[in-house]
Image (cartoon, coloured by chain):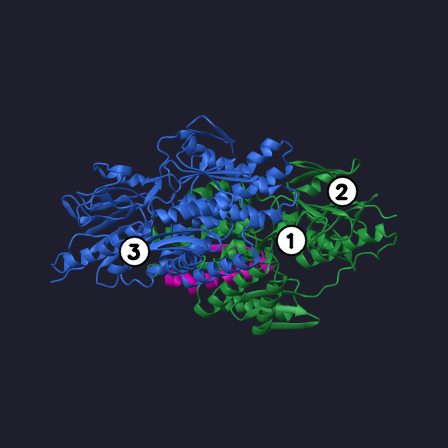
Chain colours: A blue, B green
Amino acid sequence: MKTKKRIVIVGMGFGGIRAANALAGKGHEIVLVDRNNYHLFQPLLYQVATAGLEQESIAYSVRAMARKWPGTRFHLSEVIGVDFARREVRTDNGSIPYDYLVIGAGSVTNHFGLHSVERYSFDLKELTDGERLRNHILTAFERAVNEPDPSRKRALMTFVIVGGGPTGVEFAGALIELVHFVLAKDYPELSTHAARVVLVEATDMLLAAMPEQLRTYTLKKLRSMSVEVLLNSRVVDAGPERVVMHDGAVIPAHTLFWSAGVKAAPLAATLGLPARPGGRIQPEPDLTLPNHPEVFVIGDMAYLEQDGAALPMTAPVAMQMGIYAGKAILAKEAGTQMPPFRYHDKGSMATIGRNAAVASAFGMNFRGYLAWLVWLLLHLYYLIGFRNRIVVMLNWVWYYWFHERQVRLITRREVEVDANRSGGI
Amino acid sequence: MKTKKRIVIVGMGFGGIRAANALAGKGHEIVLVDRNNYHLFQPLLYQVATAGLEQESIAYSVRAMARKWPGTRFHLSEVIGVDFARREVRTDNGSIPYDYLVIGAGSVTNHFGLHSVERYSFDLKELTDGERLRNHILTAFERAVNEPDPSRKRALMTFVIVGGGPTGVEFAGALIELVHFVLAKDYPELSTHAARVVLVEATDMLLAAMPEQLRTYTLKKLRSMSVEVLLNSRVVDAGPERVVMHDGAVIPAHTLFWSAGVKAAPLAATLGLPARPGGRIQPEPDLTLPNHPEVFVIGDMAYLEQDGAALPMTAPVAMQMGIYAGKAILAKEAGTQMPPFRYHDKGSMATIGRNAAVASAFGMNFRGYLAWLVWLLLHLYYLIGFRNRIVVMLNWVWYYWFHERQVRLITRREVEVDANRSGGI
């Protein structure tokens, strides 16, 4: 006889919502838990930071999704631990018992112990990070207008981006286009061509996951757009107005953006399991925890090797793990068993600027206009909410035709932004 | 010989941007000053608070406007005073000398000395007020889900709105529709029909500026939508979970919204001029200050009587005053003189809900569907920015067809919201 089980899903990221979708309407009680009441489409957060999109267009209400998922309910709270023996999730808002648990709490920025960097840098993980960084960038230009000292003026218009992965590359491209196409018109009193966007990468290549041909294209394209790319370089220290490089060189810069690494969300460390690289947890090949076949770990929190290499902490991996966890629970309840989880790499892509992207998929490499079109369409496809798609498309078309980004609003003044920063981003 | 003058315009509200538009490209140097880098379309702020619009769609970058205004530049700063003798505007970011000055710093909420109300109530004057109130409303429902005590649960779903003017009426209608049409679907675990929206008005009528026929319609319509309208009632005290009425009655309510009055922005009190009702300043009939024909006061800060009554503190008055001030400066420079300012009342309107609005214009009264259509079109017309109009229209169409408001995001958790509140809204 089939009994109704309570399945708790922690984290409404790419993995969690796929798990929920796979499990909904199958006769079980499903509790969705997240500290935010929305799913965030993180891959477009850099466009919020560069004034291209409003934050509301890349987030979607969990309750709106849950309406289409019979048997689910939503619990807004932050998970602070799991009592595996009692089978309870502990939250800042009460405990939730479970029969099955799917943990996908995602990742946070990894500053690799560089406290000054942690204090003075911006990152893009949470929805509000996008607006905060946008406010900071636009405020820097407003301050540059009134700054009499030429070197401080230049520092206000200097942006150091650390990390040559997709986030760093996409943010660098979007930022230099914001400056050259939009802010140059907004600030006729500034020499915006003197603005600097510096992309710092520790290895000798950008977009390490891409084939060499596309890496070379990306480097050339960014440099042709006036992004200063520093390879084999590391940032070792930071202050409010400067960035210190590994060789002691100092870049006077008002803005430091950090996308050099991520690590598992702090929840991982509370679970009492041995930490793997990036603070992650290593599940069994079926994504369950050792000795806990009722607990699944998915997404950025899960450390799994496949064909001798660790799976990357990316949205496609999380999505496939979420679907797998959902199906595996249904299989267990049906008395059957799933084969071990296996990630199918469908390729990766990154956009650099107007008409310029790189994509590697199906064993083929695309670059330039075609890759850029595919990037746009796939991001629209994966974005949740039809209205959101229309608003995002509208903003893209607007920018493409008019070289205009509309969301150039400073919604909080710098004092508050600085107060937030010292609060420890 | 015509000399180039420096004209400083303080405040990029409805009055300030009309003055700038009238003065631009006429050979003068124009400095636009505002503490925000955007013009805010305040009349739609209540729709941000009720999850209908994203905040970015009702604000427009001043620098984007200034591009179309030759000879203007923008100065992001808060004005803290004016030195009339030295002809300098003092800001938190340096002083700005002027030949002509137009002051339109607007108004703030008037709590009439009720400190507990000031501390525990929300209002809608600044852009960020909309998002803060939206976060608070949605968080109240999330908390109601987990609240075991029935009376506290009901208090979390009780919203007291003070002030039966257009803002109070429009917010009450939009809020009850949010609850009945949208949140009722989001929260199947709550008895949302038990939610209360209480509209408190001190006089015996709503929308006092309207003809009686429309006032009666508004009252009936709101009551038919289940808004509890309390006439001849006043709120005299407030706490985090209760509202105290003039007769000692206590309404257990988690949310208090105050739209019972406005007063001139604090800048008015620093100008050393006698205060008129609402802390306003009384200019000469040509809007200049006594003994200072080079200084104009416009909009909500200006107290002016016409035909025996004070002009209202509304956007249409501010717009006409802004245009007048701009033209008056050009006239002075041309050696001519303008006739005294005269406000032409084109009517007023308020929307109550779906297919329901009231409008009084050209000596005619409209109500219901037609008035609602006119309200929609006029608000789209006055909204600045073509992209903004499309996004707003899209949201309206979406809501109309699907009974769905998309911006149901809690972008800050309650702890922070409460921290903001105790900071003194």
B293 vs A10, left or right, is right
Q: Chain of mark 2?
A: B
Residue farthest top in this picture: A248
In front here: A80 or B277?
A80
Quadrant location of residue B345?
bottom right
- Is the C-beta separation of discs 2 and 1 under 8 Å? no
- Residue A39 painted magenta: no
- Quarter holding the N terminus of chain A? bottom left
Q: Chain of mark 1?
A: B
At 44% from the left and 44% from the top, the residue drawn is A129
Quadrant location of residue A363?
bottom left
Q: Which dot marks residue A363?
A: 3
Q: In what element is the residue under mark 3?
A: loop
Q: Which dot marks residue B65?
A: 1
Q: Is residue B131 visible?
A: yes
At 52% from the left and 41% from the top, the residue drawn is A136
The Cα–Cα distance between marks 2 and 3, rounded to whole angstroms, is 78 Å
Q: Specify the amino acid type for callout 3.
A: Gly
Residue A256 point in image, percent of width and height: 47, 36
